[in-house]
Amino acid sequence: MPLFPRSSRSFVAHFLLMVAVGPWASGCRRVVRADLGADRTVEAGVPVELGSGEAGAQALTWEPGDGTPSRTGSRLSHAFARAGTFTVRALHEGQEVGSVRLTVVPRPLLRAVPSDARSLLWVPRLQGNVEPLVDFYERLVGPDEAEQVLREAPLVSLVLNSLTSGASVVDPEEGFGLFLLPGFDGVVALLGVTEPDAALAAVAKELEAVGHQVTATEDGAMRVTPLDSGEPMLLFVDRGYLYLAIPDAADEDVVPGEGEPVEVLAQEEAPAVVGDVEVARRAVLGLSGEGLSESALLTELRPKVAEGNVYLYSGALQRAEDAEEAGPVRGFFASLTVQPERLVLDGFLSSTRPLLQGADAPASALLADSALGPVAAAQLSVPPEELAKLAFGAPGSPHRERTVERWRARGLDAEALLKALRGDVAMLVYFDAPGFLRGFVQKQRPEPKGTVLIDAGLTSAEPVLRLLDARLQGTSLRFSAEKVPGGKLYRTLMWGYPVQLKVGPERATLVAGESLDGRPRGDVGRALRERFGGETFGAGHMSVMADLGQLRADLEAQESVPGVSAERLASAQALVKAVMEGVTPLDSAFLDFSLAEGGARLKGSLRLREDARTGRGWQ
């Protein structure tokens, strides 16, 4: 008995034949599949490659899923303009043969900057950062002037248009920046965009409107010849960012006068043309990997400063092997945080060794006990060895040797004077509001009235006294000198103001201007630290501040001035206040530099009056 019935054997044979030759038989459909890989995350502006690049591969219809037209070919190369989640489909004769889900995220600006960039100023994300920046700048200088200045800055006009119109070719999730390259003598601006061609056209139109000549190149870039016939600029796009390479103006050749010698420097080979904008373009197009975001130094410095709206990074300059020994500075990183009436700077300077050598820096005796309410202050507090370097140069340096020899020829001991410096120098400036108002009313013109105090710590008075006596001998300056316990007191008049200098065993103090008698006294340094925060104006700090708010308060506090009627006083106060408010809305400013582990810290702020003029309300 057969294993299978005859009818069954015939059916099985026919089935096996169909399976074996069916897909290749004439008129039969071949199954097409497209492997697009796993779902993944990609960056906006960076082309995504899908499909097969092999010769003879099956042509497919590609639907990117972002609203752009479908395309046909064996391979798809597509850059998504905006962030979002999109499903890319591959179709064959109308049937889906593959798909992949792509999550598109904004391309970080740091990844669009070459890794060897020397310096970079950038806004990491336009939305939420540009608005407060523009608003603060408008409050500071006025809306009209601010707009004029900003629109003249490279690519910034596109950003301003995006703030006002909403719809724009600018990508609000990406950033704006300016960077320097080691092989290019100029600056490169970059801006995240969603429509590269439209962005190129928009910038070209604005440049032509102000008189520049714009010429398209064969490779899609635009060469810009400035109105003043300066060095040409280059406008181009790459992976979602618009770039403008701006070379520095070439130095004009200086023709020597008749009879002047001409110095010729022999060189083994001609230097590279570092003003060539193509150098910058090649650096950008050749960028691979993570760009400047992978910089080890930048990664190290970022946690050392506060988050901000704007950042500044600068790496150490590369030195030639045969050049002088590299300095201790490795790099600098800072952030700017903007609030409606305040701008705050937080920076860190990294170094390979301590920036200041020697003993601890001393605290200022002047700041510890002086008249309260200065309108300006400055302090230098460093180890005495460092102060000597600032004044006379480093030990063994040609500058120091020349200075010492020059002083020796005059019979002065420079080394003894250096040893007499303690390391602290401070200055305080006070405003004499009654004297100013009285002079303004009586003379009908403003004249500066106030007092300047300058104080330096000493370890010995004798070297300083010898220097002063030697310099004053034979001078035309009329002065008087009298001995005081441990030193001398010098008095004179300069520009009609009394000036006195007292030199004692521990400090030398100069007072120029009106007497401060009657003003309340106290710890000015502590008051400044309470005002500006941290250890500003403390030992080891180099600090400076200006306080226009204190000046206005001094003016407004005068209820009566001898020799001035109440009506004329009120009129003068109102006029001066109006002029000051029209000139600047600035309330105060300060900057502080101090040593820290691994380098030094830089802090600062600008504060505007609470009633300062408002901007256009970009928020």
Image: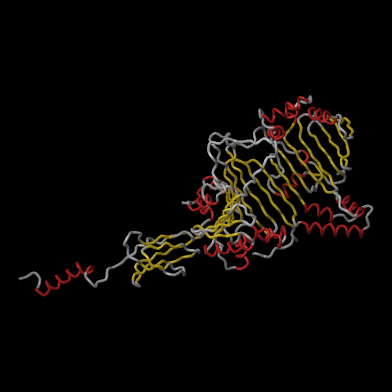
Q: Quadrant of the N terminus?
A: bottom left
Residue 354 versus residue 163 in the image, above or below: above
Taking the image as shown, residue 594 lies to the left or right of residue 112, namely right
Q: Position of residue 502 (x, y in %)?
A: 84, 34
Taking the image as shown, residue 431 lies to the left or right of residue 592, namely right
Residue 497 versus residue 73 in the image, above or below: above
514 or 474: nearer the viewer: 474
Q: Position of residue 482 (x, y in %)?
A: 89, 31
409 or 386: nearer the viewer: 409
* Snapshot quadrant of residue 309: bottom right
Q: Position of residue 208 (x, y in %)?
A: 61, 62
Q: Position of residue 233 (x, y in %)?
A: 58, 54
Q: Quadrant of the C terminus?
A: bottom right
Give the residue at x 65% y 36%.
262
Taking the image as shown, residue 19 lies to the left or right of residue 288, namely left
Residue 70 versus residue 339 in the image, above or below: below
* Snapshot quadrant of residue 350: top right
470 or 105: nearer the viewer: 470
